[in-house]
Image (cartoon, coloured by chain):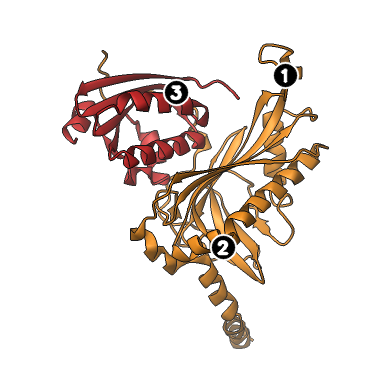
């Protein structure tokens, strides 16, 4: 399978929240690294924030990957939030109706304040 | 620790042309008169809007002996999408083909009756395309058709360059049954029928490249919970609507002939 062109960085701005900074391409091939990042970010947290500021490309496989991540978080009793999406990717969340399950914020402080 | 600022509007959008534009309700255009259109005015629904357990079903065929690239395979697949389906099922391809935002109508053989539904092309690029279901379809979700290179069975990762790789064609369905009736239908043979459907399609696709490879199936339950708030989706159920459509045929015929008489 092709290599995933994605770099993920996990941060914990406070005890309740894990932030995953996403840089590069979100495709189905990124599943192992995204799930690893989720495991690191979710340790003891009640919410996961996805930072899409560095998102360069996303295909439908990537959207599917976000759905499986969302279900995994929900089953752990965690909320999944997002920020840093440009207008194009906001539209993709809208057409796939992912925005009905993952609340999108304009900035990191806004998303952290919502937790 | 880095703390990035707000959203970057400068990001390149090289995937922009691959995605459909947002739509409130579907509109079907340029379909033949015999295609039953129960899709007009419906909303799109993804796996998050369905009722039943969420499944990820992956059907894959490895074309070990065929010399075809992933883009060439996808081009063939798009151009022959309808003819690769099992006999008795019909995919009414949009006039402009499988392109983002296009809506296709579908007539599916379901025992003695035909189920009428449709899909919208959510995403399409050179190596994949995705169909999204409307309200009333048996399931809510996405079906992604893709092709990629993978090492041949028994070949080392480093080794023999292009000779060590083969093209893999894949269908991946991420779905939930839309309503309780569809959930029961899937449990009572619907899932198996779907497995046979896509396996048959992949066999037919492989045959286009002179391959007799057998498809593999991987099934994973992503979410075992049912979403009872979505049980109301039964109102749009394609099986019920298709039955009503067939039952209403004499009335439609009478109405059409009345109009012809008035015009004459």
Q: Position of residue B221 (x, y in %)?
A: 48, 45
How many numbered discs, if any?
3
Q: Which chain is orange?
A: B
Identify the hue of chain A. Answer: red
Q: Which residue is mark 3?
A: A33
Q: Quadrant of the N terminus of chain B?
A: top left
- Report the chain holding disc 1: B
Snapshot quadrant of residue B57:
top right
Disc 2 target residue: B188
**What kind of element bears circle 2?**
helix
Question: Horizontally, is B127 left or right of B88 in the view?
Answer: left
CB contact under 8 Å: marks 3 and 1: no
Q: Position of residue A96 (x, y in %)?
A: 42, 45
Q: Which comes sooner in the sequence, label 2 or label 1?
A: 1
Q: Residue B259 has which mark? A: none
Tell whether label 1 touches label 2 (CB within 8 Å). Answer: no
| Percent of width and height locating residue B236 | 45, 66
Which mark is drawn over residue B155?
1
User: Would residue B142 appear left or right of B126 to someone viewing this image?
Assistant: left
Q: Are marks 2 and 1 on the same chain?
A: yes
- Which of pointers 3 and 1 indicates the residue nearer the eye? 1
Query: Is residue B152 visible from the viewing direction of this image?
Result: yes
Q: CA distance from mark 2 to mark 1?
A: 41 Å
């Amino acid at each position: 399978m092709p290599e995933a062109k994605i770099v993920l960085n996990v941060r914990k701005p406070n005890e309740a929240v894990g932030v995953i900074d996403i840089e590069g391409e979100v495709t189905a091939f990124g599943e192992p690294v995204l799930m690893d990042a989720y495991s690191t970010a979710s340790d003891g947290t009640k919410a996961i924030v996805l930072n899409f500021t560095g998102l360069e490309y996303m295909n439908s496989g990537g959207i599917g990957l976000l759905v499986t991540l969302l279900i995994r978080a929900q089953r752990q009793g965690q909320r999944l939030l997002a920020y840093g999406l440009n207008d194009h990717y906001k539209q993709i969340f809208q057409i796939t109706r992912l925005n009905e399950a993952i609340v999108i914020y304009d900035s990191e402080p806004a998303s952290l304040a919502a937790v | 620790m880095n703390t990035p600022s707000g959203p970057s509007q400068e990001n390149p959008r090289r995937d922009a042309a691959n995605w459909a534009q947002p739509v409130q309700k579907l509109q079907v255009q340029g379909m033949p008169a015999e295609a039953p259109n129960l899709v007009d005015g419906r909303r799109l629904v993804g796996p998050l809007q369905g009722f039943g357990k969420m499944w990820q079903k992956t059907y894959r065929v490895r074309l070990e002996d065929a010399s075809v690239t992933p883009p060439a395979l996808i081009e063939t697949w798009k151009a022959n999408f309808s003819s690769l389906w099992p006999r008795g099922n019909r995919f009414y391809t949009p006039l402009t083909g499988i392109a983002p935002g296009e809506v296709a109508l579908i007539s599916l053989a379901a025992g003695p009756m035909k189920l009428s539904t449709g899909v919208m092309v959510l995403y399409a690029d050179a190596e994949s395309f995705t169909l999204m279901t409307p309200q009333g379809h048996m399931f809510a979700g996405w079906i992604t058709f893709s092709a990629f290179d993978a090492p041949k069975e028994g070949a080392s990762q480093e080794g023999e360059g292009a000779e060590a790789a083969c093209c893999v064609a894949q269908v991946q369905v991420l779905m939930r049954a839309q309503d309780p009736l569809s959930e029961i239908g899937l449990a009572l043979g619907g899932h198996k029928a779907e497995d046979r459907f896509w396996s048959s399609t992949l066999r037919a696709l492989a045959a286009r490249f002179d391959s007799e490879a057998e498809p593999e199936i991987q099934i994973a339950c992503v979410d075992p919970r049912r979403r009872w708030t979505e049980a109301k989706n039964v109102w749009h159920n394609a099986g019920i609507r298709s039955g009503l459509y067939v039952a209403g045929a004499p009335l439609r015929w009478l109405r059409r002939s009345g109009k012809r008489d008035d015009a004459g």
